Image (cartoon, helix red, strand yellow):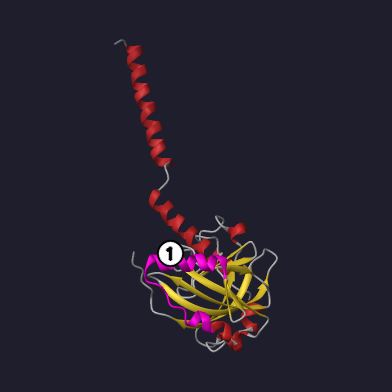
Amino acid sequence: MNRFRLSLVVMAFALVFLVDADGRAQSPDRAQLEKEIQSLREQLRQKEQEFLAPSAEDRAAFAEFLSQPNTGLVRLLPREKYDGKLTAHGGGAYYSFSLLKHEYDNGSDIELQQNELSVGFAGANWGYLAKLGDVPLETVGLDHFAVQFLATLEVPSRELGAREQQRLSGSGVTVNAARYARRGPALVNTTYVLRSINYHTSDVLVAFRIVRQDADGSMTLLWKKLKEFPQPALKP
């Protein structure tokens, strides 16, 4: 190898070394990036909680009611608008009155979509919803005529029975002049009663009233838990 070729080889190795060293110097610190991602995720979670929270005005207006046990105030977002836009699975359209969270999973009790409320989502889970009209939420208890049907419903432990309840709730049933179905229109200043059966998770009876609808279609529900039943099991 002559001196010229040797010089080229040396220069080539030097260039490779410099490029590699520069690349290592400029490569991101992955541990630091992980910390930044976690920080951003936490910031996003906090912003979403603020976005989902009911207004301060409503919290103040219903403060006395909310001071009672087993009560709450929750905002539901329209699924057709926000699903996939939030980190919360379901886009804030779902809520669990037992688990007290918006995240869609086996414990979800209610959904808002296309100005309709619905209950009973995954697997053999089912439920009924009844519109009581413009009546004060405080007057709705276990002795209310429209609540009694839901309070005394027997929950089947076999899948065949659960599927039959799904079928009935899909078509709707009328008992003592009250209409019960899986879904119904979401109307402001209207009170409802709901029973939601999520096998192996929860069985809850709730009365609620829609007290607000905002410009983005989200709705604020004032609610109280009337009864929580034993966790239902399901056999094949």
Q: Can you say which quadrant of the picture contains the N terminus?
A: top left
Residue 154 horizontal side relative to residue 113, left or right: left
Q: Is residue 140 above or below residue 6?
A: below
Q: Position of residue 206 (x, y in %)?
A: 53, 79
| Image quarter of the C terminus | bottom left
Q: Residue at x 67, y 63 (%)?
A: 216
Q: Position of residue 112 (x, y in %)?
A: 59, 65
Q: Amino acid at mark 1?
A: Ala
Per the image, the residue denoted by label 1 is 124
Query: Is residue 74 found inside the magenta-colored segment of the image?
Result: no
- Residue in view at x 34 percent, y 19 percent: 9
How many residues crowd mark 1 within 10 Å: few (<14), some (14–19), many (20+)?
some
What is the x, y in percent for residue 170? 54, 65
Residue closest to the far right: 215
* Left or right placement of residue 213 versus residue 202 in this view: right
Residues 14 and 20: in front is: 20
Q: Secondary structure at mark 1?
A: loop
- In this view, the residue in front, 51 or 4, is 51
Magenta region: which residues? 148-172
Q: Is 154 inside the magenta-drawn segment?
A: yes
Q: Nearer the viewer, residue 121 or 29?
A: 121
Please report the residue visible at 55 percent of the width from the left and 55 percent of the height from the top. 84
